Image: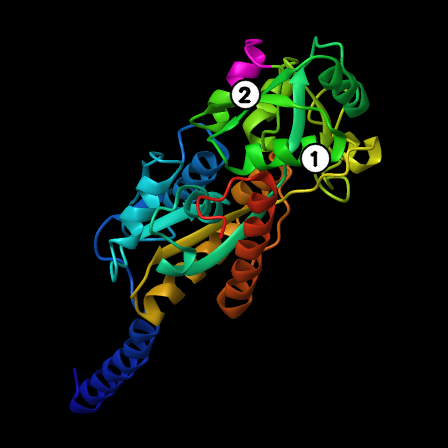
Amino acid sequence: MTPVAHRRSLLLGLGAAALAAPALAQRGWEPNRPVQFVVPAGTGGGADQMARVIQGIVSKHSLMRQPMVVVNKAGGAGAEGFLEAKGARGNPHMLIITLSNLFTTPLATGVPFNWKDLTPVSMMALDEFVLWVKADSPWKTAQEFIAAAKAQRLKIGGTGSKQEDQIITAAITKATGATFTYVPFRGGGEVAVQLVGGHIDATVNNPIEAVTHWRSGALRPLCVFDDTRLPVTEKMTDSMAWSDVPTCKEQGLDVEYLMLRGIFMPAGVRPEQVAFYEGLMARVRETEDWKDLMKQGAFNTTSMTGDAFRTWLGREEERHRSLMQEAGFLANPS
């Protein structure tokens, strides 16, 4: 190589290195060991299913160099998982997926935890609730179900005590005067199985927790607890789409409830660490796998990060405090 060619090659190499250096710097912080993904709920429920879908998407599309490990910590209506995350202050290798037990568990039990003990990362979606009965039950509408409940005390199964499912059950009683025996279980998957087995008369499960049993012909949706019908028009069974399920309000049952599906980190983490996971979850939401989950589970696809998410969380905490006070579920009513 001539001296001129050598200098040209050297300059090109230095130029490439100069271009590469900013690119590497722009990558910012990344996990350097496996990330623990805590689910403060039992296996088979909506939170567990969503966490495992996220884990699968991250792995399938190589969105993160380190593996994500899902760990269920359902004890104490999720308090076990929340307290572990609270105690992991400053640990950027832990995520926790939350449902509305983020609010209900501390309000109902007095456990020393508040959502402000965590770092909000991303609202992934809002989850719906549906009134489900067995497909061979005599009730075809919410009105028929409520009429039966007024004539005889029916059993409604749900996840945990004084949690979302029981709050909805209490709201049904307040709206209609019908009283129920509420039967708590550890997770939404178990709740659906108990209804299929005929051990309870109804549930208010999330769509994703019961859709498999609906498609198999074992369960029947009576109404959805939202102010509008679900938007998914693709058929889930031979004859029905989610959009065919009437709202409970349409059927004279004036009760509404939506639930958080959000991602948090422990408190005390750095902004660049939060930014990494915000970006990660944004990429997850762009995948067809995620879009398919949203469709199958008829999710409300609202997402938020940053200040907007924190403001929403503050409002939801107060809304749950009011709902639980009305139901008599607060550990410290004063």
Q: Nearer the viewer, residue 159 or 236?
A: 159
Q: Nearer the viewer, residue 264 or 139?
A: 139
Residue 259 shows in this picture: no
Residue at x 59% of width, y 50% of height: 322
Residue 242 shows in this picture: yes
Secondary structure at badge 2 equals helix
Residue at x 40% of width, y 30% of height: 42
Asked if 245 appears above or below 267 in the picture, the reply is above
Question: Was residue 194 drawn as part of the magenta stretch in this picture?
Answer: yes
Residue ID for mark 1: 174
Secondary structure at badge 1 equals helix
Residue type at numbered disc 1: Lys
Residue at x 27% of width, y 50% of height: 66
Q: Nearer the viewer, residue 158 or 280?
A: 158
The quarter of the image holding the N terminus is bottom left
What percent of the width, then of the height, locates residue 20? 30, 75
Q: Which of 101 and 19 is in front in this view?
A: 101
Q: How crowded is mark 1: few (under 14 residues within 10 Å), some or many (20 or more)?
A: some
- The quadrant in which residue 54 appears is top left
Residue type at numbered disc 2: Ala
- Tell me which segment is drawn in magenta: 192-200
What percent of the width, then of the height, locates residue 83? 30, 48
Cα separation, mark 2 vs mark 1, equals 24 Å
The reply, left or right, for residue 196 in relation to residue 224 is left
Residue at x 75% of width, y 36% of height: 233
> Residue 192: which disc?
2
In primary-sequence order, the first of circles 2 and 1 is 1
